[in-house]
Image (cartoon, helix red, strand yellow):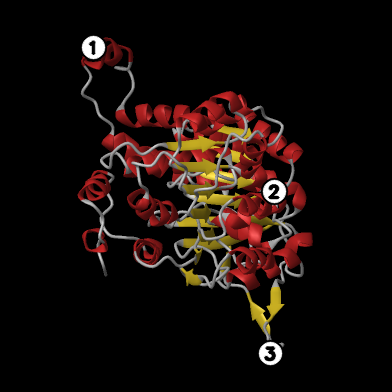
Amino acid sequence: MINFEEMGFTPGILKAIQELGFEQPMPVQEKVIPLMLGDECDIIALAQTGTGKTAAFGLPLVQATDTETNSTQALILCPTRELCMQIAGDLSDYSRYTGKLNILAVYGGASIDNQIRGLKKGAHIIVATPGRLIDLIGRRAAKLNNVSTVILDEADEMLNMGFLDSINEILEEVPKERRTLLFSATMSSEIASIARKYMNDPIEITIGTKNSSAENVSHAYYLVHAKDKYKVLKRIADFEPDIYAIVFCRTRIETQDIASKLINDGYNADALHGDLSQAQRDTVMQKFRLKNLRILVATDVAARGLDVDDLTHVINFSLPDDPEIYLHRCGRTGRAGKTGISISLVHLREKQNLQRIVRMVKKPFKAMPIPTGSEICGKQLSSWVTKLETVSTDHQEIEKLLPEIKLKLSGLDREELLKRVISLEFDRFLDDYRHGEDLIDPITEKDSSFERSDKRGSRVQYTGIPGTAY
């Protein structure tokens, strides 16, 4: 395995890499960086989100940019404001020791006048969302005649969001002699069409299997009645005390409804959908990144560009009709070398949808039994005891209060004190599940039959036992 020192980076970039904590190149970096630093070839890189794509194109791009020239030399197109800001921030980190490299992010939802002023000052690298860049080109503020490198990041997401015409218009504005790099999680016919039209004999790099899910993500499903989906969602959240998840819904109405129910039931949750203003959206996303929110309920469009490395779960409250959207969803967990799980709540009318997804993902989907009330209470209690064992008690304020506390609790023996503390801590769980074992209708044996045909026509059973409530 080649390391960063052997790739030919300048001392300034190597110093930034070291400070950022990069140890060994990730697979996509190992393949893309030597090509970018060496030949002037076009590149198509197929890799899931969270695989190190930004550094793969960002590090060599920073090295190749001439800071002595005040013209725009590179253009990076990406689907969302959030990803635009993230890429620009990452490039700034990479270039902290390489001289005055001007990087400008342009996107909707921010002052276009400020962005025009930034362009007039000079930007070596522009990171842009297609819609705002088209606007700036129309105002003759963005001058792309000296661009030598164009990077399309999350190209499939941009096409899903309807940016094909904008991408075509932008690519017509830059010199035909440019180098073009295209990064995508999937290789659709639309992506292939862009490659044929705008790329010159590109080298194709695939990390993992083409159109496959992230390697570190496992897949599971609960087969439930549609009316019981929210109850099962609550049980999943309760069964995972350290959950940090995105719950995907089909519509804005469903997203807001599920988020409101979770909030009312005492969960640290909120909604992310298209009806939110940009200020509201930024507030929700900041809370989620800081883990003040543990569950984010979102539509697919609203979640695009949300970059979080530590998600434990992606939960599909509603399955998407397009299997490629499922790939995008599950690719948001299991990132940066961590493991994650993609869980789907599947009602009986969605079985065919799941079958199509399984065929594309080419991984086993494990059928899960719905956690029982006693299992949930046991899991929560175990997590609480672990936290109790490791909590810091080095607080002088507590020492001052101990005599009074001891006096008030002196009439309780150890066992009674433990019972009261546990009852106080787990009051909600005890209330929810003391009489809740029969509130979820079981799936019948006939309904739970969940098979698919392989290419030879034989029946193939999904991994696991279809979920039933206990």
Would you place residue 59 above or below residue 216 in this image?
Answer: above
The quarter of the picture where residue 462 lies is: bottom right
In the image, taking residue 226 as reference, residue 263 lies left or right, namely: left
**Which SS class for mark 1?**
helix
Give the amino acid type for the residue marked by disc 1 in the picture.
Pro
Residue 456 badge: 3
Give the amino acid type for the residue marked by disc 2 in the picture.
Lys
Q: Badge 2 is on which residue?
A: 229
Q: CA distance from mark 2 to mark 3?
A: 34 Å
Badge 2 or badge 1: first in the primary sequence = 2
Q: CA distance from mark 3 to mark 1?
A: 76 Å
In the image, taking residue 405 as reference, residue 74 lies left or right, namely: right
Q: Residues within 10 Å of mark 3 (few under 14, many from 20)?
A: few
Would you place residue 261 above or below residue 456 in this image?
Answer: above
Give the amino acid type for the residue marked by disc 3 in the picture.
Arg
Percent across and percent down for residue 384 are 39, 38
Residue 293 badge: none
Query: At x 59% / y 34%, what residue is drawn?
Result: 141
Q: Residues within 10 Å of mark 1 (few under 14, many from 20)?
A: few
Dot in front, 2 or 1: 2
Badge 3 or badge 1: first in the primary sequence = 1
Percent across and percent down for residue 244 are 49, 43
**Which SS class for mark 3?**
loop
Dot in front, 2 or 3: 3
Query: At x 26% / y 56%, what residue is drawn?
Result: 9
Q: Quadrant of the N terminus?
A: bottom left
Q: Are marks 2 and 1 in contact (CB under 8 Å)?
A: no
Q: Nearer the viewer, residue 84 or 231?
A: 84
Q: Are marks 2 and 3 in contact (CB under 8 Å)?
A: no
Q: Badge 1 is on which residue?
A: 403
